[in-house]
Image (tube, grey):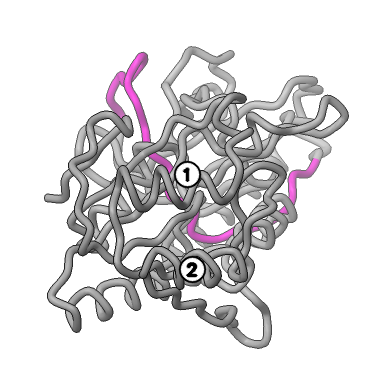
Amino acid sequence: MPQVFFSLTEVVRDPASVITVGSFDGLHRGHRVILEELRREAQARAASTTAVTFEPHPQLVVKRNTQTPVQILSTLAEKLELLEAAGLERIVVIPFTTEFSQTPSEKFVREILCSTIGMQTIIIGHDHNFGKNREGDVATLMSLGKELRFQVHELPPFELEGTVVSSTRIRQALLAGEIEKANAWLGSAYRFTGKVVRGEGRGRTIGVPTANLEPVHPHKLIPANGVYAVHVKLREHFYGGMMNLGTRPTFNGKSRSLEVHLFEFAHDVYGESAEVHFIARLRAEKKFGSIEELQAQLQIDRTESLKKLALA
């Protein structure tokens, strides 16, 4: 298990460390290429590995009043789980505040990366910017590296089927309901955690009981409305299921609901947490002419979900 520091005052400086810095939202396949290079470089130098990240997401702190708050792909807990699985030795989580956002790029490198965390090499992606107003870039690092005696490795963009993978593109795909595309870019199924709350109970009356979920994190991105094949982690076990995101137009619903029907599961789980892994989008949300039409479609959805989940 890596050492995880949640404050710069906790960090034990390691001047021989190979480090990387970023928000790492979603820890997608482009990020993982950076982490792979980090490990290779550290192994070649017999050095330690360090990932530096931020909480909350910087865009939640520095956004303009006219901007919509960023919808994050991974909570801190999810990001730490992914970073730990990457085999790193140290993870530094810097609290990102308004005051911290005003740190000049040169000061960030001198006082935080070099003097506090310590580094001999930094690995960065092709579009890395940092410091106040994102003024710092690879040229800043190269210039300071000569003075402070650290190496800078900038990696080219990671492409998949001709598309540069980025957190922004993954958000766009999820908001368009393109789950399989987003999952391919992430390298794993997109997920979110919700608390099971009481709903109106309509699912049970039509033979498809559902658990209504309330997202645990207010800024976690929820994919586009529609019906999805999902795996759900509940009580440390995974269950197959199908999920509806939307307003339930057949019942003239107004507010958005997140409802999941679990196959082969019929326990009371109110108040518990469920982690939903999106596997495939089956169809868009639709208003049916009758309850019977909806029930018939739900049987088709169930069959299609089972097929998708068997292939996942």
Placement of 275 over or under 43, stated as above or below: above
Q: Looking at the picture, how far across and down is residue 311, in whole percent?
A: 40, 72
Q: Looking at the picture, how far across and down is residue 71, in whole percent?
A: 64, 39
- As helix, strand or loop, the secondary structure at mark 1 comes to loop
Please report the bounds of the magenta region as a residue range: 266-286
Whether residue 76 is visible here, answered yes or no, is: yes
Placement of 254 over or under 77, stated as above or below: above
Q: Quadrant of the C terminus?
A: bottom left
Q: Looking at the picture, how far across and down is residue 50, in whole percent?
A: 28, 57
Query: To which residue does mark 2 refer?
Result: 124
Q: Looking at the picture, how far across and down is residue 260, in whole percent?
A: 49, 36
- 259 drawn magenta: no
Name which residue lies at 42% across and 21% down.
196
Query: To which residue does mark 1 refer?
Result: 74
- 275 drawn magenta: yes
- As helix, strand or loop, the secondary structure at mark 2 comes to strand
Which one is nearer the viewer's eye here, 97 or 216?
A: 97
Name which residue lies at 67% across and 79% down.
163
**Left or right of 56: which side holds 2?**
left
Name which residue lies at 44% across and 56% down.
21
Whether residue 307 is visible here, answered yes or no, is: no
Which one is nearer the viewer's eye here, 280 or 72?
A: 72
Determine the CA span between mark 2 and mark 1: 20 Å
Residue type of the residue flagged with mark 1? Ser
Q: Name which of mark 2 and mark 1 comes first in the sequence.
A: 1
**Left or right of 13: which side holds 123?**
right
Name which residue lies at 32% across and 75% down.
36
**Quarter of the figure with residue 232:** top left
Residue type of the residue flagged with mark 2? Ile
**Label for residue 8?**
none
